[in-house]
């Protein structure tokens, strides 16, 4: 274990003293608002079953708040592939892609991703945050329009901010409002609609068929971020294009290797070859940030190979979602409809959502309560994220805990 020495200088410059006071006050305001984020320390691999450490004490909890939908974060086949890749191609790249940071494996992974999404070409990034951050600015100018769902991920919002195109925003998955934006944007040169595939707070899937209909009617491109949907949504988990049979109608997909696809890190943009080519010329997070490490690239290639061999993992995930939802509805809980692996257990009251999560923790179940401003006022909830790695026994334990806590806190009878 690395133990830090206290060898920093004890003197503090005058300017920092004022800034420090300012930060302390801001931090206190965050705490007073109940929005302060603490990291919880896990001392095992990421899994459906983890050990956490608090105040020097260790305890086991069942994990229902990771994005580990396919349960691959501790998959032994991927770990072996990562080790093999490290032996064959080293630890790090020490370069951006276009100088001396592209190995044969990077190209192989880009082909695997293109195959998975049925696209022409793919460009890797260090994260999907970078893929979205570097997507719009190289492609669009002040003559163009970006039309964005109000609940899109922060990285899409930041990517749009970095671009000079005109911005339009429509209410979450509201097709009438999207149509209004498209009409307003008709005078622009090019238009692109940008949406998450699955919205992470409700677990709802973007209505891609209707979005594509409107895109065709109003001559717009379509971009979807598959971070929470790839590996989950669609008959065999290939994402929203499969779910809505929209192949050839969605122009650009972005996604992460940090959720369903193994959970390590890395992101990508995949689509028509000219778009990917232009991103390789001008996308700043690609041009000015390091290549994805060989261990992650090798394991990701193995992961796509594994998903290509069988749909079993995805089938198990969908069975788990169905089982959990059915039992929870039977128990009297109010659950948002979902086609994803996200189950929003609605409690509506902010304090109740925090108390509920704390009580669940005591029962050995790790779930997160969300309330305003993360979700709309009076829409507080517990978000449950299901995984193919959850066993029936683990699901039963979680459901029993929900029922016990629900009765104790008068949420259900
Ligand atoms: C998680 C997430 C990202 C960020 O992905 P990273 O690879 O972790 O940077 C981007 N977009 C959406 C919709 C996400 O859910």
Image (cartoon, helix red, strand yellow):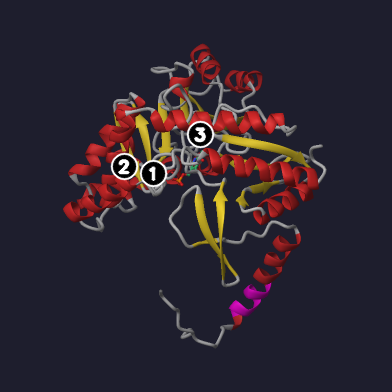
Q: Going by the picture, which residue comes out furthest to the front? A: 393
Q: Can I make out residue 396 in this image?
A: yes
User: Which sits earlier in the primary sequence, circle 2 or circle 1?
Assistant: 1
Magenta run includes residue 20 = yes
Tag 3–tag 2 contact (CB < 8 Å): no
Q: Is mark 3 within 8 Å of ligand 1?
A: no
Report the disc number at residue 262.
Answer: 1
User: Which sits earlier in the primary sequence, circle 3 or circle 1?
Assistant: 3
User: In the image, which residues are magenta?
Assistant: 15-21
Residue appearing at x 62%, y 44% in the figure: 398
Which residue was labeled with disc 2? 300
**Closer to viewer: mark 3 or mark 1:** 1
Report the disc number at residue 341.
Answer: none
Query: Which is more toward the observer, 263 or 387?
Result: 387
Q: Quadrant of residue 204?
A: top right
Residue appearing at x 26%, y 33% in the figure: 111
Image location (x, y in percent) of residue 279: 34, 37
Which residue was labeled with disc 3? 165
User: Which sits earlier in the primary sequence, circle 3 or circle 2?
Assistant: 3
- The C terminus, quarter of image: top right
User: In the shown orientation, is residue 194 left or right of residue 83?
Assistant: right
User: In the shown orientation, is residue 36 left or right of residue 242?
Assistant: right
Q: Is mark 1 within 8 Å of ligand 1?
A: no
Q: Residues within 10 Å of mark 2 (few under 14, many from 20)?
A: many
Magenta run includes residue 12 = no
Secondary structure category for the residue under label 2: helix
How far apart marks 3 and 1 lie (CA) works out to 34 Å
Magenta residues, dominant SS class? helix
Query: Which is more toward the observer, 171 or 287?
Result: 171
Image location (x, y in percent) of residue 405: 74, 47
């Amino acid at each position: 274990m690395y133990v830090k020495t206290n060898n920093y200088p004890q003197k503090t410059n005058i300017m920092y003293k004022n800034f420090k006071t300012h930060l302390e006050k801001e931090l206190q305001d965050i705490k007073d608002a109940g929005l302060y984020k603490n990291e919880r320390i896990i001392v095992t691999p990421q899994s459906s079953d983890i050990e956490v450490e608090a105040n020097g004490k260790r305890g086991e909890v069942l994990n229902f708040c990771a994005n580990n939908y396919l349960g691959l974060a501790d998959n032994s086949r991927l770990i072996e592939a990562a080790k093999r890749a490290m032996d064959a191609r080293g630890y790090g790249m020490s370069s951006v892609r276009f100088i001396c940071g592209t190995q044969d494996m990077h190209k192989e992974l880009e082909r695997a991703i293109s195959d998975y999404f049925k696209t022409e070409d793919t460009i890797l990034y260090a994260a999907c945050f970078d893929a979205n951050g570097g997507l719009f600015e190289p492609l669009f100018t002040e003559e163009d329009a970006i039309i964005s769902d109000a609940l899109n991920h922060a990285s899409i919002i930041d990517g749009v901010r970095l671009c000079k195109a005109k911005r339009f925003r429509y209410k979450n998955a509201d097709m009438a409002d999207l149509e209004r934006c498209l009409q307003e944007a008709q005078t622009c040169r090019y238009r692109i609609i940008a949406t998450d595939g699955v919205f992470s707070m409700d677990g709802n899937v973007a209505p891609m068929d209707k979005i594509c209909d409107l895109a065709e009617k109003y001559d717009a491109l379509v971009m979807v971020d598959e971070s929470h949907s790839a590996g989950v949504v669609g008959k065999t988990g290939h994402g929203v294009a499969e779910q809505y049979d929209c192949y050839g109608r969605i122009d650009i997909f972005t996604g992460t290797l940090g959720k369903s696809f193994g959970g390590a890190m890395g992101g990508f943009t995949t689509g028509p070859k000219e778009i990917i080519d232009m991103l390789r010329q001008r996308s700043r997070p690609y041009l000015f940030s390091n290549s994805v490490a060989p261990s992650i690239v090798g394991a990701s290639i193995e992961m796509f190979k594994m998903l290509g061999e069988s749909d079993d993992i995805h089938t198990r995930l969908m069975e788990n979602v169905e089982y959990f939802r059915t039992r929870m509805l039977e128990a009297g809980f109010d659950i948002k409809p979902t086609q994803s692996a996200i189950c929003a257990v609605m409690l509506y009251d902010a304090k109740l959502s925090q108390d509920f999560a704390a009580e669940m923790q005591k029962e050995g179940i790790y779930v997160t309560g969300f309330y305003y401003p993360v979700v709309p006022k009076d829409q507080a909830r517990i978000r449950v994220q299901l995984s193919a790695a959850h066993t029936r026994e683990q699901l039963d334990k979680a459901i029993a805990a929900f029922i016990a806590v629900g009765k104790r806190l008068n949420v259900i009878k």
